[in-house]
Amino acid sequence: MNCFSTNTLPMFVVLIFVTILQLMNFSSADSRQSFLSIDYYHKTCPQLEGIIQNKVSAMINKDYTMAPSLLRLHFHDCAVRGCDGSILLNHKGSERSAAASKTLRGLEAIQEIKAEVEKHCPKTVSCADILTAAARDATVGMGGPFWEVPFGRKDGRVSTAQEADRLVPMGRENITTLVQFYQARGLTLLDLVILSGAHTIGRSSCGSLQFRLYNFNGTRKPDPSIDVKYLNYLKRKCRWASELVDLDATTPRGFDAAYYTNLQKKMGLLYTDQALYTDPRTEPLVTAMATQPSLFFQQFSVSMVKLGNVQVLTGKREGEIRRNCNFVN
Ligand code: HEM
Ligand SMILES: *[C@@H]1O[C@H](CO)[C@@H](O)[C@H](O)[C@H]1NC(C)=O
Ligand SMILES: *[C@@H]1O[C@H](CO)[C@@H](O)[C@H](O)[C@H]1NC(C)=O
């Protein structure tokens, strides 16, 4: 029997387990992160974080749904060739044109922030760094935790739709596949559970979950891991694939730990969300976060920094500082 598989493990055992995983975080952290630093632009662009923060909060004030979109955009950037701004490139066949990118938003928002940054600090700040900081500010803007963002990423010159469609998880994967995806990027099982907590804000198109509602996996029945009332709600709501549904059914406008308590109530929207509670490897971590929201906030900060460090370009001859986020120089 898997030693983590029972619901009845006392909470302190789970917490010790989480603490051990946290300690492992430090030893397995991507060594490239040491090339990034919090004061990277302190001399060359001291206003940078203020500019980004002002822009992001103005955008959220106008339309709060921009916050989750910016957070997701950063994830899609980091998922393919690391956090190198490759998602922003706008040429024929670039990542933006992938099926996996179809519902991405916020690309123009980053373009707008970059234009403002160029006015103050021309040819200095990478698009990848701007996107990373915008994702942090979007999180804070929704009531989530603050963390210091290490800077110094260069922008990549390569972006292909095929890679995005091959690499970016779409919500139908099993936990084994997701763990492998994260491991390949230096991220752990704990990072998987924590970063999925970003789905405490934002929406999904029905197209990403309709397969759960009627004929799940060829059974001619709905996915048994959905609560019946929630299932009926989703069936009513999802008449078109383009319809949007809140990822967090209870508190969609706030960044909080409700994502995890929803999973305990079989109210995870995506198959990959609910699977975190079904799978014995991740269930104890979901339970720990549902019980200890402050632990979720703390660890979200840690895991987001790790996400932002994935495969970053930092060497003198690696990448470039793009002048326009849509095009290589
Ligand atoms: C575990 C792997 C992940 C999978 C399978 C996944 C899958 C998805 C899917 C299918 C959607 C809805 C797309 C649509 O149909 O419109 C979505 C939305 C979203 N994802 Fe993820 N995701 C994952 C990880 C992440 C991570 C790591 C983050 C950020 C740290 C993130 C942040 C978001 C946000 C905020 C939204 C809502 C976007 C909006 O409202 O515009 N996701 N995700
Ligand atoms: C998970 O998904 C992969 C890829 O679709 C598949 O090869 C594998 O058999 C699945 N594993 C489990 C445990 O279902
Ligand atoms: C789908 O069905 C196959 C074959 O019956 C099974 O092995 C697999 O675990 C099922 N996948 C899910 C997600 O239930």
Image (cartoon, rainbow, N blue to C red):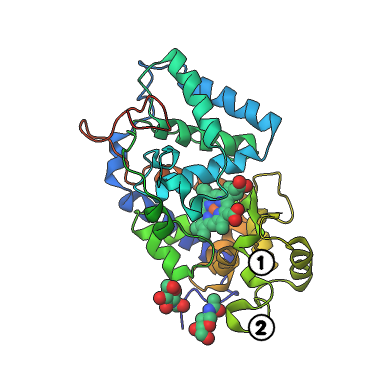
According to the picture, the residue beneath numbered tag 2 turns out to be 220
Give 313 or 105, whichever is nearer the viewer: 105
Secondary element at image label 1: helix
Beta carbon at label 1 within 8 Å of ligand 1: no
Q: Is residue 71 above or below residue 1?
A: above
- Residue tagged 1: 264
Return the x and y of residue 136 as percentages of the image width and height.
Answer: 52, 36
Q: Is residue 195 visible?
A: no
- Name the residue located 43 percent from the left edge and 38 percent from the top edge: 90
Classify 41 as above or below 237: above
State left or right for residue 141 relative to residue 279: right
Q: Residue furthest front?
A: 92
Q: Residue 85 or 312: which is nearer the viewer?
A: 85
Determine the image quadrant of residue 245: bottom right
Sequence-earlier tag: 2 or 1: 2
Q: Residue 7 location, x and y as percent?
A: 60, 74
User: Which SS class for mark 2?
Assistant: loop
Few, some or many residues within 10 Å of mark 2 (<14, 14–19, 20+): few
Q: Amino acid at mark 2?
A: Arg
